[in-house]
Amino acid sequence: MRAPLLFLVCSGLLAAYSVAFDQHDYYPSSDGGEWIMNAQVVSPSGAATPATAHRKVEGQVEKDGKTYRRMRTWSDIGSSPKEFLTLFRKDEGGCYTLSEQEKDAVEQTEMIFPIKVGRTWTRIVQGVNFTATLVGVESVIVGDKTYDECLHIRAVTADGKMTEDYWEAPKVGTVKADMVYPNGVKLILTIREFKPGK
């Protein structure tokens, strides 16, 4: 699940404005915060396999003079599920992540403040280069709940073979993500439950 990775802005006016609400409402990272996501892995033939993905904030970490929150992500996707440990922080300039599992990992940008539709940035995820774009601010319906003012971010590799669209809701974080991999497999995540931290 991500940190965690594309559509055209319908109006030229949207690309010119900065979001008027509090940008610090996005990417919540309080200790104990937990996201439980419904996952669906869809094969190129259309066969879907259900699964569950989790992310939990598990305390504060000091590294290289910066204060991070540790986020543990795990799932029951696939025959050999993996766990990822990521450090997360935000400041007046944006939001950043740092892998705890990759040797010589470099801090990656997840969002640039002030939040502005049309803004782009680059990042490397597990050795793959992505260009991310904030393509809009949208409402997202998941089940019987509507999440307003969601940041819709699209990340794409240089060759266009891997894409991720995801939506970040204020005070909740990721509520939906659609990923397409080079082999044609799709991963769809939708929020089942969010437990705010303290």
Image: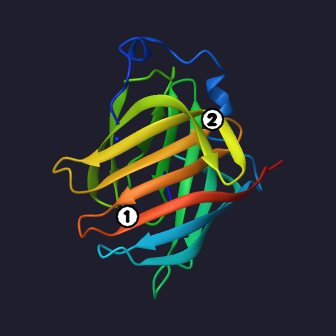
Q: Residue at x 66, y 22 (%)?
A: 22
User: Which residue is most to the bottom?
Assistant: 79
16 lies left or right of 45: right
Q: Secondary structure at mark 1?
A: loop
- Residue 122 appears left or right of 82: left
- What residue sits right under mark 2 in the picture? 26
Q: Is residue 178 above or below residue 145?
A: below
Q: Circle 1: is it few (<14), some (14-19), or many (20+) Cα within 10 Å? A: few
User: Where's residue 130, x and y in %?
Assistant: 29, 47
Badge count: 2
Q: Earlier in the sequence, mark 2 or mark 1?
A: 2
Are the residues at dot 2 and dot 1 in contact (C-beta closer than 8 Å)?
no
Please indicate, yes or no, whether residue 65 appears anywhere in the rendered image.
no
Amino acid carrying mark 1 in the image: Lys
- The residue shown at (65%, 29%) is 24
Q: Is residue 143 above or below residue 89?
A: below
Residue situated in front as seen by the camera: 180 or 98 = 180
- For residue 78, say whether it is visible: yes
Mark 2 or mark 1, which is nearer to you?
Answer: 2
Residue 147 position, x and y percent, is 66, 39
Classify mark 2: helix, strand or loop: loop
Give whichever of 61, 24 is nearer the camera: 24
Query: Is 67 in front, or is 182?
Result: 182
* Residue at 38% over, 42% down: 154
Residue type marked 2: Tyr
Packing grade of label 2 (10 A; few <14, some 14-19, many >=20) is: many
Q: Which residue is mark 1?
A: 103
Farthest-out residue, right = 198
